[in-house]
Amino acid sequence: MAEFFEEWRNLEEIEAFSEVLCLLHPARCTFTPSIGTSAEGRDIFSLQVGGQPNGPAVYHQALLHARGRLGVREGAG
């Protein structure tokens, strides 16, 4: 899995990796294909990792800027 972060990935690859990650760990991760759309009309996907309904939560946001090449590594780290 670490190999994924060794190369630059496009949005489609990142989204597919995120979905598979949640499929492999359904008790820990929930993938939502769209929580809205970007200004350019693209779906914004979401991952919920851990937590319990109505329990404490931490919000972490990543991959906001087109040139944020390290965003995947920083967001996952």
Image (spheres, rainbow, N blue to C red):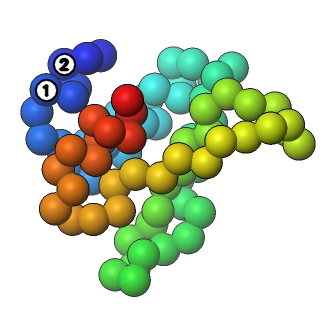
Say which residue appears at 39% left-offset and 33% top-offset.
76
Residue type at mark 1: give it.
Glu
Residue 43 % position (x, y): 45, 66
Residue 1 % position (x, y): 29, 16
**Residue 46 against residue 65 in the figure, above or below:** above
Q: Which residue is mark 2?
A: 3
Residue 51, visible in the rendered structure: yes
Say which residue appears at 59% left-offset and 63% top-offset.
35
For label 2, count other residues whose C-alpha is less than 10 Å away and answer few (under 14), some (14-19) or many (20+): few
Describe residue 45's horizontal placement relative to residue 6 as left or right: right
Q: Are marks 1 and 2 in contact (CB under 8 Å)?
A: yes
Q: Residue furthest right?
A: 54
Question: Considering the numbered disc 1 on the image, is that residue within a helix, a strand or a loop?
Answer: helix
Q: Which residue is mark 1?
A: 6
Q: Residue furthest bottom?
A: 39
Say which residue appears at 61% left-offset and 32% top-offset.
49
Describe residue 51's horizontal placement relative to residue 32 as left or right: right
Question: Considering the numbered disc 2 on the image, is that residue within a helix, a strand or a loop?
Answer: helix
Say which residue appears at 73% left-offset and 40% top-offset.
57
**Residue 48 against residue 69 in the figure, above or below:** above
Residue type at mark 2: give it.
Glu
